[in-house]
Amino acid sequence: MDRPSRKAALVVWVESAKTLTGCPDCGVIAVSAGRREVELIDAPVYATPARLVWRKRRWRCQDVDCLRGVFTEQNPTVAAPRALLTRRCIAWGVRQMRRENLSLQGLARQLGVDWHTAWKAIRPLLEQAAADERRFTGVKTLGVDEHIWHHVNPARRGPKALTGMVDLTRNAKGAVQARLLDLVPGRTGKAYAGWLADRSDQFRRGIEVAPLDPFAGYKNAIDEQLEDATAVLDAFHVVRLGTAAVDEVRRRVQQDTLGHRGRKGDPLYGIRRVLQSGAENLTPNQSRRLERVITADPRHEEVFLAYQCAQELRAAYQHHDLKAGRRIALKVLDSFHSCPVPEIARLGRTLRRWRQAFLAYFTTGRANNGGTEAINGLIELARRVARGFRNRENYRLRMLLIGGGLDGHLPT
Ligand SMILES: [Zn+2]
């Protein structure tokens, strides 16, 4: 058993007040059988590792017919039987990991133990919380996103990609406090559908809105498992498809006109950033540069046409009035697919395939997958701090913890 040394640790001795104690088996009043000192790892004090030495009372049952014999006092509010860490130490550690993004190594260092000891104490609580289906109660908006776990050989560690489910339900004030609900292996519709199928009927019926990135697999899972939910194509990703199309046109025209890839000094290459920006954000200087480059060669007009299309797509989302925004979106659906610029026509066909989910943004009060991006930021930070996770289940539990998916189901 790992009983770390008391060196460089603050040591606190405790004992319970003396009371009459009955035998847990027969109830007969027991007599004292001395003490047993049990040393526990406690939450740090003054930034110093702390040890709690609990002078446990021992008792002997005096009933001749009772098999109990000697027994030791227990108090689960101090520590679970046979635990190495006190209950408050575990709760402190979980809070540090959840709120302060403390790594397990950092936590272990502050407790003066090795990380296995710390993790062995914390992991069962996370497992228990993760298995508690009550944490899915009240989810109305359910986002889904792919998630890269690791970058090493999948033969060694399993699939690189995971599918993450995120609670994007708005609170009473209309704000989204994104919570990572779960992570399952694979980046497939099957992974998402399987997870949905494992939930209760009540959970599935409760989902009203399901934002997603333009990935048909996830869409199929929603259609199959969440019949009553409205799938919403994520605005950010749609806008990004637009700017990506502009970039493709720029590179193609660049190649056609100059016969090489864009490089410093090439006119189109010089405005590549301008072409990625919203027209409303351009400085007068940038606007003039854009105009100068476009008018310099009639073949550049195609680039400008693509740019205007991407701006129209942005305008649909940016319009403060959702009805007006929807009208622009309908115009996009009616025009892009027949655009003479092939990249825009392709985008138009994609949007027409996603017509309902694309338009649903305007009828769901701007439902979007943005909250999942916030979760991904938290995860990235935790991954940098921890320098990687080898075990997928450990990874899942850590990410659910820092992603808020276990909030309200952990010891406090
Ligand atoms: Zn007894």
Image: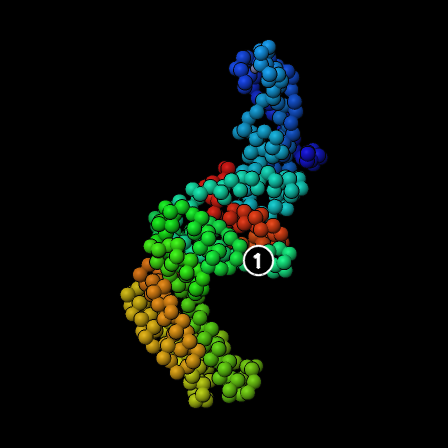
Image quarter (top left, top right, bottom left or bottom right) of the N terminus: top right
- Report if residue 88 is visible in the image: yes
* Front residue (pair 258, 355): 355
Residue 270 position (above or below residue 196): below
- Report if residue 19 is visible in the image: no
* Front residue (pair 381, 7): 381
Q: How many marks?
A: 1
Decide: few, some or many residues near mark 1? Use Cα within 10 Å; few <14, some 14-19, many ≥20: some
Identify the residue shown where x is 51% and y is 80%: 251
Residue 70 position (above or below residue 1): above
Residue 294 position (above or below residue 196): below
* Front residue (pair 26, 255): 26
- Residue 265: % across, % down: 55, 84
Q: Determine whether the residue tagged by mark 1 lies in a helix, strand or loop.
A: loop
Task: Give amino acid for label 1.
Answer: Pro
Residue pointed to by mark 1: 159
Identify the residue shown where x is 56% and y is 55%: 381
The answer to whether 373 appears left or right of 326 in the picture is right
Quarter of the render that holds ligand 1: top right
Identify the residue shown where x is 66% and y is 24%: 37
- Residue 400: % across, % down: 51, 48
* Front residue (pair 70, 58): 70
- Residue 124: % across, % down: 56, 39
Res. 408 image quadrant: top left
